Amino acid sequence: MIVHKLNHHDFEEPEYVLLALRAVCEPYQIAFLLNSYVGTHFKRIAKELEVPVPHGIAHFERFQYKDQKLGIQWDLIANKGIGVQTADSSVQTLFDLPSLPLTSNAILISEMKQIDCWLTKTMDEYDADESELVQKMKQITQFQFVGIIDSEKVKTKYHTVFDS
């Protein structure tokens, strides 16, 4: 008989810090600026973040950097994406031609529409000092706003933890 003892660490969620970015540039340019000024090595992930929305799925650009030595994973996610409406097979067109999917603008965390990108720093152990990181990011002239967001105040929390 095999006995598996559960530890209280088995049920803990990883610690993460959520930063909001407002910038005058596109998400790929934000990733480049972070690589240049902060010393990260963000790379675009081919698989975009897909979030279910009413009548379809929204796609958001995603960049990732994993620091194996420090045990930190960084995710840079665009707050604005494209929602694609799923096809309804019950609707018939005039000539039964396949219809093109309808697209619309989508926002990842809707209560903060003015934010352009979200930066999450997920770590194995809690590191409370993010002031140095924020100060480096505030020196980037293209960033209009950089701030740490309390994840408890975000209503759509399940959008803020990104699986690999």
Image (tube, rainbow, N blue to C red):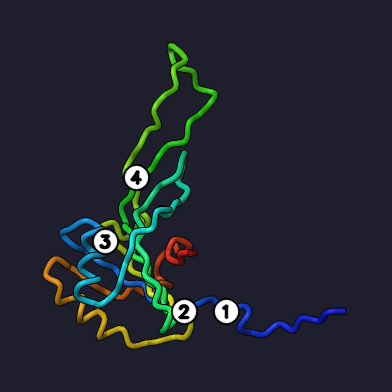
What x and y, as percent, mark residue 46?
39, 53
Q: Nearer the viewer, residue 156 or 91?
A: 91
Q: Would you name the residue on which mark 3 appears?
A: 115
Question: Residue 15 bears which disc, if any?
Answer: 2
Circles 4 and 3: CB atoms closer than 8 Å: no
Relative placement, left or right, of 58 versus 141 is right
The image quarter containing residue 160 is bottom left
Q: Nearer the viewer, mark 2 or mark 3?
A: 2
Q: Answer with mark 1 or mark 4, whichever residue precedes in sequence.
A: 1
Q: CA distance from mark 1 to mark 3?
A: 29 Å
Relative placement, left or right, of 61 versus 141 is right
Q: Nearer the viewer, mark 1 or mark 3?
A: 1
Instruction: Please name the residue shown 24% across and 77% down the image.
Output: 38
Q: Answer with mark 2 or mark 3, whichever residue precedes in sequence.
A: 2
Q: Would you name the residue on which mark 1 appears?
A: 12
The image quarter containing residue 77 is bottom left
What x and y, as percent, mark residue 120?
37, 71
Under circle 2, the secondary element is strand
Q: Answer with mark 2 or mark 4, whichever residue precedes in sequence.
A: 2
The image quarter containing residue 35 is bottom left
What x and y, as percent, mark residue 131?
26, 85
* Residue type of the residue flagged with mark 1: Glu
* Residue type of the residue flagged with mark 4: Ile
Q: Answer with mark 4 or mark 3, whichever residue precedes in sequence.
A: 4
* Residue type of the residue flagged with mark 2: Glu
Question: Residue 82 bears which disc, if any?
Answer: 4
